[in-house]
Image (tube, rainbow, N blue to C red):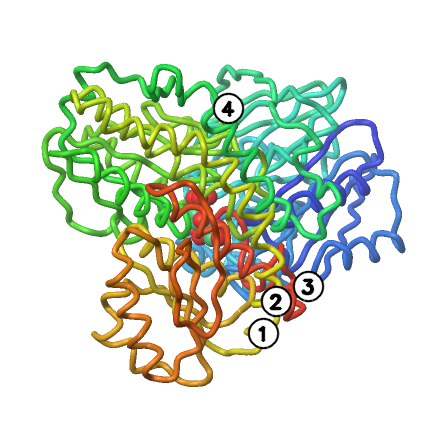
Amino acid sequence: MCGIVGYIGKKPVQQLLLNGLKRLEYRGYDSAGIVTLDVTGKPTLLRAKGKVVELEAKVREHRTRDSVGIGHTRWATHGAPSKRNAHPHNAGDLYLVHNGIIENYLELKNTLSKRGYDFKSDTDSEVLTALIDSLYQKNHDLLEAVSGALQLVVGAYGIGVVSDKNPDELVVARKGSPLIVGVGEGEVFVASDASALLGHTDRVIYLHDGEIGLCTRDGVQLYDSEAHAVESQIETLELDLEAIQKKGYKHFLLKEIYEQPESLRSTLSGRVHTDTMTAKLGGINMTNEELRAVKNVMVIGCGTAYYAGLMAGYIAEQFLDGVTINSYIASELRYRSFTVPDNTIALIVSQSGETADTLACLQELKRRGVKCLGVVNVVGSTIAREVDGGVYVHVGAEISVASTKAFTSQVAAIVIFALMMASAKGVNPKELSQYITELDQLPSEIEKVIEKSVGDVKKVAKKYASYEHALYVGRDALFPIALEGALKLKEVSYIHAEGYAAGELKHGPIALIDDRFFEVCYLQDNWLYEKTQSNLIEMNARGAHVIAITDTDRRVAAETVIRLSTKLTLLTPLVFNVVSQLLAYYMAVAKGNDVDQPRNLAKSVTVE
Ligand code: F6R
């Protein structure tokens, strides 16, 4: 959740670290800091509360020409956002940046306090710094000290450490938090996210869990947790600078909403064939016999990724007779005593491929011998590397903290997988062909709907932005869309919003309706239309302020109607969702919020 950067080479490092931190700021943005060492090891430590621009102002007043350093942008876990709690932390000779959580930090803190360490922050990360320093003081071997300390630690970490006794080394390590090393000529870059390396090098090494890297100007040597040298594999980074720029849009969120036709085309490309009416995924590593044998599919994710699984399940069960599809919230599943029936496979859904709870479920299911397939965006991410096979959704970098284009493509990818399974099970191809046709039409339908509805959505957003609460309701596949719509709204506009199955209204939430609420009701023609309309009428009867999002030509008795026209039927909920994304975006803009970096949130939740 925090961003880590590091560099050792010949270039002045301060600006380089700042630029890296700006690219990683979407991972955490409540405080930031850097430390650099000069040739004698003299440190310059600069930290600031707030965004990286605050730190930048400090750097301007303390320019150095140092060429080794580490930096951090924080998402607070232990201790409030403040300069004192900002990284890098210092203990003895060492400076450390950390992403993750050290679970046994209180116990370690007690022991280290007795040994004379005096703690200035509330963080677990400062304790880890002191722990490594306590071992470092024995013989000033940083690699050995890091390895020794990490064996005493319970928790998750991605770390970068430097010592003021040796400005020629930077040590990194990971367990449960991503870390990438970029290799250049006479220089080594470190980052928790590939985007910080763009423009510097495309030769990267992804550290595996438990690995430690000793970086010098000559390159990097990897070690296992006990400091035995291990081989590393240099891979080519497939991400370009363009992908992480706003390209004229005011916010990444808007850019990513508008990008959906294109990002979806990348997801579908080479996988959905309307000439043969087939759908195929390359990387799932399953034979037709294996697909035929599947009786139970567990779809696992968090937040938007969970809703994508839920939504895809509603669609897939329409054509996958005899297969049970259930979606699970990863943070719940991991602590449940669940039973896995025979012939189960799991789909692990994650944009970042780093979400801690999702990863934990993957590891538990693998331990139980369940075949796990990933539905992941970030290439080379931990989940992508640990699954038995799977599909990259290929939506490109998703920078805005609120997930949009990933959702649409996650649903599409799971539906493609389900179509493959249906076909292997001998479902009549005619039954599947409409899904294939609609998947193929979906990008242009989204394009059309954005173009035609954006004007209306802007006006509606302005009209309702001052409301305090919102209820989103829909039936069938529009229920997960209601959940996702409400999540998007609360994340970026801070309007309290809840998603409900429309049929559940009278079982409780209808009691909430008053003038502080508006209600978003999804009404799809020819799809439980009359049932949902009854819910709408019931809401009207209680003075509700309903915004109906609909594709019908019929008269809709709602305070406000956003009418779309689409040739889709089966996948219409996905275009409705794009309208909700726009609504959330324009409400956040109307309220003057920080749209791309909403308060308290961060992209990529690598802690529990
Ligand atoms: C919501 C959002 C989050 C993520 C969730 C899972 O807009 O972005 O709910 O969907 O944290 O993240 P990934 O997909 O990276 O596992």
User: What type is the residue that disc 4 sits on?
Assistant: Tyr
The residue labelled by disc 3 is 83
The residue labelled by disc 4 is 223
Number of the front mark, 3 or 1: 1
Asked if disc 1 and disc 4 are in contact, CB closer than 8 Å, the reply is no
Rendering coords of residue 47 (x, y %) = 73, 57
* Mark 2–mark 1 distance (CA, rounded to whole Å): 6 Å
* Mark 4–mark 2 distance (CA, rounded to whole Å): 58 Å
* Mark 3–mark 1 distance (CA, rounded to whole Å): 40 Å
The residue labelled by disc 1 is 463
* Residue 152 in view of the camera: yes
Mark 2 neighbour density, 10 Å: few (under 14) some (14–19) many (20 or more): few
Dot 3 or dot 1, earlier in sequence: 3
Mark 3 neighbour density, 10 Å: few (under 14) some (14–19) many (20 or more): some
Q: Is residue 280 above or below residue 522?
A: above
* Mark 1–mark 4 distance (CA, rounded to whole Å): 59 Å
The residue labelled by disc 2 is 459
Rendering coords of residue 568 (x, y %) = 39, 41
Mark 4 neighbour density, 10 Å: few (under 14) some (14–19) many (20 or more): many
**Dot 2: element:** helix
